[in-house]
Image (cartoon, rainbow, N blue to C red):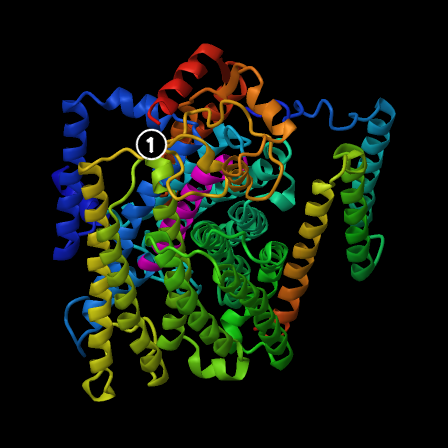
Amino acid sequence: MWDKIKDFSSEFFVTGDPLILGAQVSIGLTLVAIVFTLTYFKKWRWLWTEWLTSVDHKKIGIMYIIASILMLFRGGVDALLMRVQLAAPELEFLHADHYNAIFTTHGVIMILFMAMPLMFGLFNIVVPLQIGARDVAFPFLNSLSFWMFFFGAMLFNVSFIIGGSPDAGWLAYPPLSELSGSPGVGQDFYIWGIQISGIGSLATGINFVVTILKMRAPGMKLMQMPMFSWSVLSSCVTIMFAFPILTVTLFLLFLDRYLGAHFFTLDGGGNPMMYINLIWMWGHPEVYIVILPAFGIFSEIVATFSKKKLFGYKSMVFALMSISFFSFFTWAHHFFTMGSGANVNAFFAITTMIIAIPTGVKVFNWLFTMYRGKLSFPTPMLWTIAFIPCFVVGGMTGVLLSVAPADFQFHNSYFLIAHFHQVLIGGVVFGYFAGLYYWWPKMFGFRLHEGLGKWAFWFWNIGFYVCFMPQYALGLMGMTRRFNEYDFDMGWQPLNVVSTVGAFLMGLAFIFQVWQIAHSIKFFKKETSGDAWDGRTLEWSIPSPAPMYNFARLPQVTSQDDWWEKKQRRLRGEAELPEVAAAEQAPLEPIHMPRNSGIPFIMSFSWFVAGFGFVWDWKWMIVVGLAGVIISMLARSFSYNTDYYIPVDEVERTEAAARGAH
Amino acid sequence: MANHNAHSGHGGHEGGHGSMKSYVIGFVLSIVLTIIPLVAVMNDMFSKQVTTVLILVMAILQFAVQLLFFMHIRDEKKPRFNLIALIFGLVIMLTIVAGSIWIMTYNAVAT
């Protein structure tokens, strides 16, 4: 009996690596600490009723952001471990297997479990406020999306200590990711973690498309919508058409591994190249999915801190929408070297170059918005200013890579690594940081400490260039990705040391950000105006943090940058426009709101159980998990008490309390 | 959810829901379009190539029948978001299928 348990646990838990043992111990201690704290302060009920079951888009947004910051920490530690290993030739720090696992999890976590949820968090917090809505179109589905993401991400992360991490690269190319190449359970954790969270992403995409098309405040035409909301629309349209491809591709890989199908095997009529073809049909739109909202954030920030209307609004909308269209026609540039022939490569090289044009349009729009504006440079604007040159260089190296014949030299070298980190860090990460700093006062009702924010900003920026500029050179010197060792006589060491130093500078920058948040909470000072930056769009017209129903009366919108125009009319002492005045003086009405529900949490947890069962092929666990999913669906189908009205006097009280602070 | 005026009930106002007659026609058509390829395959009526083309044609017609009689694509009010989404979806689908065939032609391992 005892031997059996020992056998099982040696297969079940990852053992034999001091680093992982340390992680296991610290995860265990953290869990104990969390449970203890919640019990000691009697916060379990509060956690369940206020957060876990919440369908409020603002709370869901905050939960997304917390989860993504934790994932940023894990992905960042992975990155630092890799940089340590590469700092010297033939270092015995991470062995090949461990190194493979770490670069795989670093990629998956940073894209799918850091960038995506941070993006969804900002969608959730900002979009309904910005378009003058009281929630998203489907609040229950929104909560379900979050929990599907969360449990998918947890299923993926659990592989680190249970069963072993996936180690076939972040996109898991077969034949390596097939049963023949990866017999362990790591690859199954990969498939189920991504599948479960992918359903959540797809649902969020649908949710926000409907919210934006159907729930704008009265009077707000599509062409008067704030640019961030436009970018969310373009990103979500791309999600709706790209994510099903990912789901199907990974499902086919699952069939190969679980049922012995031959879609991507080398024998039995399969073709691994087909997987690469299919996965990049999702993978390429995916990078635009994460960058488009960052473009929207920069557009908001540039206009706000230049005190000018965004230059070229229509061209910006056109650029965003055309990028989401063209993003579906460039996928083969990820595998020019596959040998599809000159015609295929020429076609995809040209589409790749074409898609650089709308991005260039946007850069000029931001520059012209700043031109002759009344500029100020708080942290959100600093990130925006830093983004422009960084992204331009990253985009240029992308155009170099798009030249198919030259790509045969660059392919899978550190030149490519430097390129995509430059657009993803310089574009996506800088963008979401800018957005976090910009909307932080709206989310929590207090400002972040500017001084510490500037330290973090400079460490991030200097660290970024120190880390990645040498990698372009290393790529041209012949260093390829995914090697954990190189020889002394390659001459790569000096630049690798520089690069590692840069990575640690970015690690320091992260510590500054944590310090900044902690410091700002400790010296909490309420931001009472609700309009922290003298903003232009509707979210700044309500108190911070927004009351649960957002708008006591739905605003009547008459122009682009409606809140700014209204403030200008007040400054000039003009009478309010008749339709706006009528909307503002209308009597309060009871507000229709969705009820909180525990079903999304339970259903997603059931998916987690089912996924875990599939990973280990424990039939009873699969049955239990899927039964939970079906029961949750039935429970939702037969629950009729899903909404309620907030009475007028409660709205009046809340408004008086929020506005009383003025 | 909470935007009352923007939220026009659950389909109640989005055009009618079709008449009994149109549902019956749609139902009969979809069954006929299913039976034709089934019969053709079961009885080996045509060569392989003709059968493939026949199945594809029937599938496309079936798709149209579903959209016209059950999804009410004609009754949509302006702006026609559903129609736009459908056309975009078809373009993407065509890209995926044709693009994959084109790319993979050069990578066939065995035939």
Does A115 appear in magenta? yes
Specify the segment rendered in magenta: A106-131
Which residue is disc 1 drawn over?
A528
Q: Residue at x 33, y 21 (%)?
A: A49
Q: Does the magenta stretch include residue B52?
A: no
Closer to us: B58 or A210 = A210
What secondary structure is the magenta-colored segment mainly?
Answer: helix
Vertical comparison of B75 with A560: above or below = above
x 80%, y 55%: residue: B51
Q: Where is residue A262 in the image (x, y as percent from the top left)?
A: 52, 59
Name which quarter of the figure residue A460 lies in. Answer: bottom left
Give the quadrant of residue A656.
top left
| Residue furthest front as drawn | A573
In the drawing, does residue A117 fall left or right of residue A289?
left
Residue depicted at 82% across the width and 53% down the height: B54
A391 in relation to A631, above or below: below
Amino acid type at mark 1: Thr
The answer to whether residue A618 shows anywhere in this view is no
Tell me the chain of label 1. A
